[in-house]
């Protein structure tokens, strides 16, 4: 629906707003695009002073590593087909088979993993086929743009970066699951409670959230270091030392994130009329059944939005993970920092860039998968009533 003419912006103001947003998007997206391009080139091209050498990679292309016209066309069609199947077909399947209204979170994730598996398997077949076709295609099969995956292979396989990815997965999964479980129950209880105690609990949580992270880490660290002695009366000689383990990081990040989670989920619950609870109770539901079968289906956008913020906190954390984890259990962010600190050659620098690009892929995937829930959740949380 078009806006009323009285509310339309003047033409000059429209141009100014569009120009500002465009410039901001270019400035924000350019570093990610540029380091992504650098990571697929030989070091001499990656750090060239000529931007066209960085983009087209003449030295990379001269070494026989590149993409031909056939590669670009077939690769574009393949990516488009996979993306269309992922975001249309899989979303439809998840919506039809979901026990709640809208896509089921776990079902969507499971199907997305299936799609990624198809990308890997079909991608390997496509690469082998294109290598044969390029040999027979003449000028259309010659490299047009320099392109190599050697740096990613060195990072993930030779330098075992996958271990850091696994550690990040353990930490983020633990933080998100615990934060959402506790935050959902606490937020629901505080939203439905009319006592003054609920208000002071929220204020205390907000003050706790405002504390510097270094203060919390300093307070927890002696407990983690001496955890074996503390837990020995309960677990005996098998009592573990939590310092250096992902469980210690999960405990601290949950403590940091929980106040924010409770506040945010409470706001979402307040936007849901209490009459829904009352109607469910009249129909014979217990408090737990009313919460799970009536309130939670309406709350999925809010839960997913809050879960995404919890994921970003745990995924991008540097201070807590670098202080509490040893070198064998490091997550990706502190591992990349040490990667940049130990680089000595231009090849090491490009590999560090490739590692930095790698950690952005899960973020883009999450936003693309849950964009509808995210937009709906942010809109719902912003409107009271």
Image (cartoon, grey):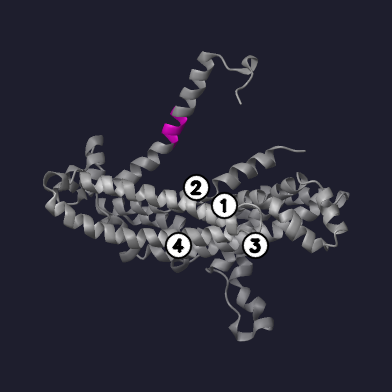
Give the number of the mark in front: 4 or 2: 4
The C terminus appears in which quarter of the rendering?
top right
Q: Which residues are magenta?
A: 23-28
Q: Is residue 25 a member of the stretch shown in magenta? A: yes
**Marks 2 and 4: in contact by CB < 8 Å?**
no
- Dot 4 or dot 2: first in sequence order is 4
Q: Nearer the viewer, residue 74 or 311?
A: 74
Q: Residue at x 61, y 53 (%)?
A: 307
Q: Residue at x 48, y 50 (%)?
A: 87
Q: How many numbered tags mark residues here? A: 4
**Marks 4 and 1: in contact by CB < 8 Å?**
no
- Dot 3 or dot 1: first in sequence order is 3
Instruction: Examine the rendering and report whether any part of residue 375 can be seen.
Output: yes
User: What residue does disc 1 label?
Assistant: 313
Give the number of the mark in front: 1 or 4: 4
Location of residue 282 by image quarter: bottom right
- Whole-angstrom CA distance, mark 4 to mark 2, is 16 Å
- Dot 2 or dot 3: first in sequence order is 3
User: What residue does disc 4 label?
Assistant: 114
Q: Is residue 73 left or right of residue 102?
A: left
């Amino acid at each position: 629906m078009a806006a009323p003419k009285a509310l339309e912006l003047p033409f000059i103001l429209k141009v100014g707003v569009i120009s500002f947003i465009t410039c901001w998007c270019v400035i924000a997206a350019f570093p990610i695009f540029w380091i992504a391009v650098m990571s697929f080139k030989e070091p001499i091209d990656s750090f060239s002073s000529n931007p066209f050498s960085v983009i087209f990679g003449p030295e990379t292309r001269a070494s026989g590593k590149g993409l031909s016209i056939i590669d670009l066309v077939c690769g574009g069609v393949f990516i488009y087909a996979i993306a269309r199947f992922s975001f249309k077909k899989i979303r439809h399947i998840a919506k039809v088979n979901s026990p709640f209204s809208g896509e089921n979170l776990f079902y969507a994730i499971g199907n997305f993993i299936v799609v990624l598996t198809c990308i890997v398997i079909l991608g390997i077949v496509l690469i082998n086929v294109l290598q044969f076709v390029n040999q027979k295609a003449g000028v259309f099969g010659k490299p047009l743009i320099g392109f190599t995956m050697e740096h990613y292979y060195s990072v993930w396989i030779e330098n075992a970066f996958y271990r850091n990815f696994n550690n990040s997965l353990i930490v983020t999964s633990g933080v998100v699951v615990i934060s959402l479980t506790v935050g959902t129950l606490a937020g629901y209880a505080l939203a439905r409670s009319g006592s003054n105690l609920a208000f002071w609990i929220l204020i205390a949580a907000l003050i706790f959230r405002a504390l510097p992270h270094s203060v919390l880490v300093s307070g927890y660290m002696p407990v983690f270091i001496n955890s074996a002695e503390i837990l020995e009366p309960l677990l005996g000689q098998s009592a573990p030392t939590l310092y250096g383990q992902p469980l210690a990081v999960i405990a601290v990040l949950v403590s940091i994130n929980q106040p924010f989670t409770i506040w945010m989920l409470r706001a979402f619950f307040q936007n849901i009329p209490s009459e829904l609870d009352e109607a469910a109770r009249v129909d014979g539901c217990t408090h737990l059944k009313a919460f799970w079968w009536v309130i939670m289906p309406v709350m999925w956008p809010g839960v997913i939005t809050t879960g995404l913020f919890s994921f970003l906190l745990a995924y991008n954390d540097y201070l807590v993970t670098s202080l509490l984890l040893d070198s064998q259990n490091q997550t990706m962010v502190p591992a990349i920092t040490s990667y940049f600190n130990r680089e000595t050659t231009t090849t090491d620098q490009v590999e560090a860039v490739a590692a930095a690009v790698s950690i952005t892929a899960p973020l883009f995937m999450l936003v693309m998968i849950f964009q509808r829930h995210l937009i709906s959740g942010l809109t719902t949380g912003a409107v009271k009533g």
